[in-house]
Image (cartoon, rainbow, N blue to C red):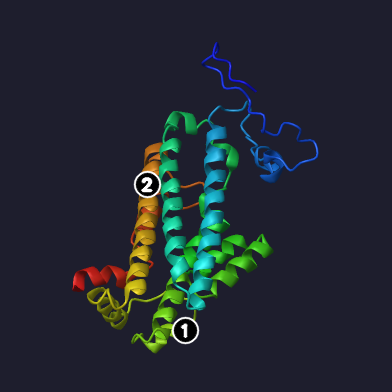
Amino acid sequence: MAHDESRPNRRDLEDGIHTDLGDRLDYHSYLGLDRVLDAQFPLSEPQHHDEMLFIIQHQTAELWFKLIIHELKAAIRNLEEDDASPCLKILARVKLIQQQLFDQWGVLETLTPSEYIQFRGVFGSSSGFQSFQYRSVEFLLGNKNADLIRVFDHKPDVRDELKRILESPSLYDAFIGYLARRGLDVPAELVDRDWSEPHEFSSDLADVLVGIYRHPNRWWSEYALCERLIDVEESFQLWRYRHLKTVERVIGYKTGTGGSSGVDFLERALKLRFFPELIEVRTRL
């Protein structure tokens, strides 16, 4: 098709573009958009304009959580197979996904308190605290807490999968095991332990990591992996803080819909660490 010079603000359809898609896999079908775009069910009556924002915000976060879980499980598998190189790209990707999640809060912050209270009551006791995927991410990163599984007793399949993640090595556990197999003097009790319990700070492990940081040329892949882990931890903490500030901005110090203390509950989460020895390294060097 020849370009029409008389209409400079029009882009003509190229001859090679497929237009007869009746018997082909198209974009809509490949992505399952019938299900994705028909998964928003506002409950306010009459429907409040901003409830759609609230639903899509959280559904989008769940899709990103799904990808983070996919990536973290791959990183753990690679470390358990002593193949750390792919983890550098995987964790770099996780950091960028976390950045998307961080930036999303800015969209939700366009929701004012007076707007939110008009439909907050329609979702009852539902809360992000009940997100199975968010809890999976926390467990995969090492923030293990068996008590939290009770929240999912009403969904046995979900509960059982979360229990499996709880009882499996976290990303940090896999990293520590990898260091041990590389010949570093990792304390034995960190390599063979009850994976359902959270990792406890080890001064001896901090010494091992200090050695890596003091000799990066000798331990380059381990050194680079340490920095990718720090990226993920820092990004997660920034996301937690942005979550707290968004909640504070929209509902102040009200109790959360799921029964938590709201902002106070989120503030306590900021003190949780996934990889404490990697922070201690900074102090010791």
Farthest-out residue, right: 23
Q: Nearer the viewer, residue 168 or 20?
A: 20
Q: Position of residue 284 (x, y in %)?
A: 19, 74
Residue 187: x and y, percent? Answer: 36, 87
Q: Position of residue 226 (x, y in %)?
A: 34, 69
As shown in the figure, which amino acid type bears the numbered disc 1? Answer: Arg
**Dot 1: what SS?**
loop
**Quadrant in which the C terminus is drawn:** bottom left
Q: Does residue 261 appear anywhere in the picture?
A: no
The residue positioned 37% from the left and 55% from the top of the image is: 235
Residue 161 sits above or below residue 208 on the image:
above
The mark found on residue 74 in the picture is: none
Q: Name which quarter of the figure residue 268 lies in.
A: bottom left
Q: Nearer the viewer, residue 247 or 124?
A: 247
Q: Answer with mark 2 or mark 1, whichever residue precedes in sequence.
A: 1
At 62% from the left and 34% from the top, the residue drawn is 42
Residue annotated with mark 1? 193
Report the residue at 46% width, 51% height from top: 97
Residue depicted at x 56% and y 61%? 70
Q: In the image shown, does 151 or 133 lie closer to the viewer?
A: 133
